[in-house]
Amino acid sequence: MSMLFFIIAIVFVIWGVVSALVMTDYISKRGHKINVFLFRLYIYRYIHTYCELTKTENGKPGFWFYSYIVCMNVALICVIIGAVLK
């Protein structure tokens, strides 16, 4: 049973990474420089920049921002449940 929660967590982490990459592509197309070598350190800055850009364009954060937040939280919860059940 706990393995099921770990598999679900892995799927959500992969979707969160895809969301982060899409957000990075979005802000790159808007003229912001992306540091590929320090991507893992700057990812939260890029997510914040995406949120601010979409807020100014649409009045609310974009879909990918919510997708990233939800995916990472669900993955965390699944890992915790899987660890407790193990």
Image (tube, helix red, strand yellow):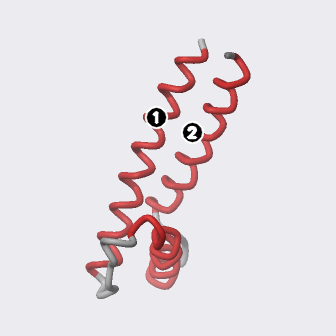
**x then y, percent, for residue 41:** 48, 69
Q: For the C terminus, give its image quadrant.
A: top right
Camera-side residue of 37 and 73: 37
Q: Residue at x 45, y 81 (%)?
A: 53
Quadrant of residue 79 within the rendered picture: top right
Tally of numbered discs: 2
Look at label 1 and name its amino acid: Ile
Name the residue furthest right: 84
Instruction: Give yes or no for contact between labels 1 and 2 (Cβ–Cβ under 8 Å).
Output: yes
**x then y, percent, for residue 25:** 29, 69
Left or right position of 3 against 11: right
Relative to 70, is 30 above or below? Answer: below
* Labels 1 and 2: the sequence-earlier one: 1
Crowd around label 2: few <14 · some 14–19 · many ≥20 (10 Å): many
Q: For the N terminus, give its image quadrant.
A: top right
Camera-side residue of 67 and 20: 20
Helix, strand or loop status at disc 2: helix
As drawn, the label of residue 75 is 2
Helix, strand or loop status at disc 1: helix
**x then y, percent, for residue 5:** 57, 24
Q: Residue at x 47, y 43 (%)?
A: 13
Name the residue furthest bottom: 31
Relative to 66, is 78 above or below? Answer: above
Q: Residue at x 53, y 26 (%)?
A: 6
Crowd around label 1: few <14 · some 14–19 · many ≥20 (10 Å): some
As drawn, the label of residue 48 is none
**x then y, percent, for residue 11:** 43, 34
Separation (CA) of disc 1 from disc 2: 7 Å
Look at label 2 and name its amino acid: Ala
Residue labelled with disc 1 = 10
